[in-house]
Every structure is written in C-alpha cells, then in structure tokens.
Amino acid sequence: MKRNAQPLSSRFMASRPPNSRFLSASIFLAAIFAAVALISSPSRSQSALPNKNSRQYTGPGSCSSPACHGSIGPRTDNRVKQNEYSIWIVSDKHSKAYTMLTGPVGERMAAILGIGKAETSHKCLACHALDVPAEQMAHTFDKTDGVSCENCHGPASAWLGQHTERGWTHAQSVDLGMYDSRDLLKRSKLCLTCHLGDDKPGEEKYVDHEMIAAGHPDLYFELDSFSAYMPRHWKEPGEPGEPDGTSDPWYDVREWTTGQAVQLQQALLHLAARTHGTVWPEYSELECYACHHSLVPATQSWRQARGYTDRRAGDPPWNASRYVIFREIVQQVDEPGMQKLDADLMRLTKLMSTLNPDRSAVAALATSSAQAAGDMAVELNKMSYSPELAMRLLQRISSDADTISNQDEHSAAQAAMALQSLFVAYDRNAKLQNSQELRTAISGLFDQLQIPSSYDATRFSRQMKQVNSLLQ
Ligand code: HEC
Ligand code: HEC
Ligand code: HEC
Ligand code: HEC
C-alpha cells in the first residue's frame, strides 16, 4: 500500500521554494532549504489559537494588492517580502485545500463516511477552510479560499487598517487579534491543529482510521521540513531587510527541536483525549504498517528477524515516532529531565502496544508526559545552539540506526526529515567536506520511504549507517 497516493519522498522532491537563498543542487534538498528566520518576540497573548469569537475574517483578497502582500517578487528593502499572497496562491497547497474536498477522492470519502457533501461538512471544512460562523465573516470573505491568511494569522478586521502604519508593532497587532505565529511554540501548535488534530472541547477536528480507510492521507508532521516545503513566505533572521542583531544561524535547528517537543506534547494530549472516545484503541494511533505491510516468506521477514521486544508477537505497536527521535535531542541537552520522561514513555509504549490498553492508565501517563514535553519545548526554544551540538545530533541519530529503523516506517520518516534538517543547517554554517556524498546518502533514506508498505528496517538501517560513516 502506498501512503495514500502521495509517497513521502516524492512530496519533498516535488517542488522547490521560490526565492530560496539556499537552493542546492539536488531538487529534493532545494525543497527543504534551510530555515533561518524570525525574531521571536516575547509572547504576549496567552490565549492559545486565533480567537474565533470576536473580530471578523476579511478573506485573502484584502491582503492581495501588489502594494500590500501581492507583489510579484520579494522585496529586499523591508522585513516583509510583500509577495506572500503570490506565494500562497501559486505555490502553497493551503490555497487548494478547499478544492480537495470537491475532487474525486474527497467526494468518495464523503460518500463512504455518509456525511453528505464534503464541502459543506464541518468534519472536513474544519481543516480545509476557515469554517467560522456567519457573523464573523466580513462581506469579502469566501470559504472556497481554503486555508488562507487568517487561518494562521487570525481575524484581520481589527488590525488590517492600522498594521501598515509607520511605527506600528507586531505586539499591537497581536493585541487586536493577530495570532502570534512568530513564537515557535505557538507556531507549532497552530500547524498541528490541522496536521495532527485539535481536541479542544466542541472542536471536531481530527483524522481517524475510519477517515483514512475512506481515503484520507495519514497525518504526520515536522515543523522545519514542512515549513520549507510549504514554502515559507517570510524572512528568517539575517536575511536582507531583517534588523541587525537578529541573526540566529541555528534557527532551523531550534525550529526542529522545538517543533519536535511540541509535536510530542500535542500527540500525547491527543492520545489522552482519544481514551475517552467511543472507538478504542483508535487504529490511527498505532503503527500503520504493522497491519498494512506486504507479507514475505518467513526467512525474509525483517519483523520476525527483529523479534517483538516487550510485546506479544503480532500485537500492533503504538506509533512512537514522535518520541523516538526526540529522545536523542533530550539526551543531548537535559540528562536528568530525560530519565523520568523516558521511563514513562517506555511504559506508555508497552501499554499502547497491547490489544486493549487500559484507558485510564494510558490517559494518566500521556497527560503527565505531555506536561514534561511541553516544559522541554520552552527550554529548547530559548537555549543556544552550536555547530558541535548540531553535529552530535547528526551523529547520534544516525548511529541509533537499528533502534530507530526497527520501530517501523513512521520513525524512519522522522529520522530522515531530522537528518536532512540538521544536515542542511550544518552544511550552511560550518561547511562539510563531503557534503555531496552526505546529500546523496540522506536522499537514499527518502527513496526507501516511497512505498511505505514495503518498508524494510534492515535496508533502512544500513542506509542510516552509511550516513553515519560519512559523519565521522
Ligand atoms: C484534522 C484536520 C483535517 C480534517 C478534519 C480533514 N482533513 Fe483532509 N487533509 C488534512 C491535511 C493536513 C492534509 C494534507 C496531509 C499531508 O499531505 O500531509 C489533508 C489532505 C486531504 C486530501 C488529499 C490531498 C492531496 O493532496 O492528495 C483530501 C482529498 C482530503 N484531505 C479530504 C478531506 C475530507 C473529504 C475530509 C472530511 C471527511 C477531510 N479531508 C478532513 C487535514 C484534515
Ligand atoms: C499555514 C499558515 C499560514 C498561512 C495560510 C499564511 N501564513 Fe503568513 N506566516 C505564517 C507563518 C508561520 C509565518 C512566520 C511567523 C510570523 O512572522 O508570523 C508567516 C509570516 C508572514 C508574514 C511576515 C510577518 C513578519 O512580521 O515577518 C507576512 C507578511 C504574512 N505571513 C502574510 C500572509 C498573507 C498575506 C497570507 C495569505 C495570502 C498568509 N500570510 C498566509 C503562516 C501562514
Ligand atoms: C487550518 C488548517 C491548517 C493549518 C493551521 C495548517 N495547515 Fe498545512 N495543510 C492543511 C491542509 C488541509 C493541507 C492539504 C491541502 C492540499 O493538499 O490541498 C495542508 C497541506 C500542507 C502542506 C503540503 C503537504 C503535502 O503533502 O503536500 C504543508 C507542507 C503544510 N501544510 C505545512 C503547514 C505548516 C508548516 C503549517 C503551520 C505554519 C500549517 N501547514 C498549518 C491544513 C492546515
Ligand atoms: C490494527 C490494524 C490496523 C492498523 C494499526 C491500521 N489499520 Fe488500516 N485497516 C485495517 C483494517 C482491518 C482495514 C480494513 C481492510 C478492508 O476492509 O479490507 C483497514 C483499512 C485501511 C485502508 C483502506 C483499505 C485500502 O486498501 O485502501 C487504508 C488506506 C488504511 N487502512 C490505512 C491505514 C493507515 C495509514 C494506518 C496508520 C495511520 C492504518 N491503516 C492503521 C487495519 C489497521
């Protein structure tokens, strides 16, 4: 089985972001050009996500004039590129999100699920458009615009007029309802509301196995790679037009580590919420390819060769990919904090890899571990990064080849994205002698993820070891 229609690596190979400063020779790495980025302003508003209850949504048309955000090329004399609308409408899939609902896959999905038309069902609009009550829509608003500016930046009516005035600050806009997506913690949470799901009471926003079996792609995420692939329509510290002194050469490593911690936190909260669901265990929490792989003769089975540590042979394991790589980060930066979280997550993994896991035990472990992951996200976002740390992470992750590969395909995908993000950042800042070989070796990891149902841990591990040998 393919990862619904669009295998992982081909997505990353598909396009290159316009205006990247870091276009590399390989198309696939061009897509994942390095992050550098934005000044993190101190967080002001504590409210979690764009406030949907007050201000009005005006629609992307109100941002699209060439003098505003609809410029054809990027401006270099300003912090803001001003071609954000052009990037979004041409290269960013978010602008096509609504259209997905009316296409053949969307239509069939809706028919299988028995929800009427996908494009009128909140079950789909929740993530594929801005689905807000009529009183919050300005007359210029149109749902068919898909995932547009205000999905991420918050309702614009209150700050639209003023935010272009000289001396007007980001903080002032945030006070008037702009979402503070500069803050990496908040930015990650924002993306994950749709790329993982949102469990806020009253918010029906999730993709479960029933939807996946009806045709929906499996959801996975990694902040740095996904931002590059989106592609970014914002400047990163140090780019022309950014104020002096804001440069942060390891910003993309920060983005990756912080994104990993927030992703783990949100996934654990999501799991805890699912323990209260009618369906338990929810299959989309488990490792897909434990059930969906193609069978081979016993002598060729890597799963049988690996064995079933800590679980009964044949019980589907929990998808632990949001932790397997993250623990490498925590081991490098916070040994003591690591131990309890690690012990708890090992218990959780074992528990979730049984046929009918005890709901309250899962909820308790997931909730307390989410708290610990959240605390670490705050630390990772503010600590300083160095070439040595980036190199240690590259070496550690690639040397853990067997453990990571044996977890199955999701963890392998996270490892490939991690190695790539770290490599791009390291190579830009500290230059590697053998960067071409490394690039090819990392690209070889993605090649193996093309058809997830025929993923082979032994082969993947061998490729990771090759990456590791090039880092010595
Ligand atoms: C929790 C948020 C969420 C909900 C709810 C949701 N989707 Fe999606 N959908 C996504 C995301 C995110 C993607 C892109 C996944 C990726 O490529 O990583 C996507 C992708 C898709 C695609 C595939 C697009 C492609 O490029 O192949 C289709 C079709 C689709 N969704 C239809 C639906 C339908 C129909 C519903 C309602 C039954 C629905 N979605 C509900 C988040 C959601
Ligand atoms: C999927 C989420 C998403 C969508 C959709 C989106 N943005 Fe953004 N945008 C971001 C993120 C994340 C940043 C970087 C953090 C920041 O500056 O807020 C950003 C940054 C920006 C910036 C730079 C802000 C600064 O101070 O440096 C501008 C301007 C902008 N976006 C305008 C737009 C416009 C106009 C649209 C619609 C055409 C749009 N964005 C759509 C997520 C999004
Ligand atoms: C309101 C929901 C929503 C939010 C918030 C959101 N996305 Fe998405 N995203 C989607 C949907 C839906 C799709 C699928 C669109 C399609 O295929 O046409 C998607 C697709 C993508 C894709 C393309 C994936 C692929 O396989 O082609 C990337 C990359 C992406 N999003 C990155 C991000 C990032 C980074 C953020 C946060 C800054 C973010 N998204 C925030 C809903 C969202
Ligand atoms: C515990 C076993 C199990 C797990 C784990 C599991 N599935 Fe399934 N899945 C099934 C079964 C059983 C069916 C129904 C097959 C049928 O009707 O023929 C199914 C159906 C499907 C289908 C529709 C059948 C098809 O061939 O198109 C897709 C797609 C799918 N699953 C994807 C996934 C993905 C992606 C994940 C992980 C997020 C996952 N599954 C996790 C057991 C599982």
Image: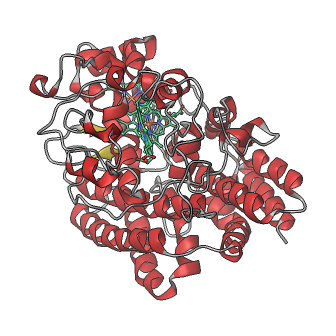
In screen coordinates, is 95 left or right of 368?
Answer: right
Q: Quadrant of the C terminus?
A: bottom right
In screen coordinates, is 385 left or right of 63?
Answer: right
Which residue corresponds to the image point at 35% horizontal and 27% vertical from the top-left?
A: 128
- For ligand 4, give the image quadrant: top left
* Image: 190 above or below 389: above
In screen coordinates, is 253 left or right of 109?
Answer: right
Residue 340, given in percent of the width and then of the height, sits at 40, 83
Which residue corresponds to the image point at 49% horizontal and 47% vertical from the top-left?
A: 221
Residue furthest front as drawn: 166
Q: Nearer the viewer, residue 126 or 283?
A: 126
Q: Quadrant of the N terminus?
A: top right
Q: Is residue 155 visible?
A: yes
Q: Nearer the viewer, residue 17 or 444?
A: 17
Residue 374's quadrant in the figure? bottom left
Q: Nearer the viewer, residue 227 or 470?
A: 227
* Image: 240 above or below 292: below
Residue 253, given in percent of the width and then of the height, sits at 59, 62
Which residue corresponds to the image point at 73% horizontal and 43% vertical from the top-left?
A: 29
Residue 390, given in percent of the width and then of the height, sits at 67, 69
* Image: 214 above or below 272: above
Residue furthest bottom as drawn: 336
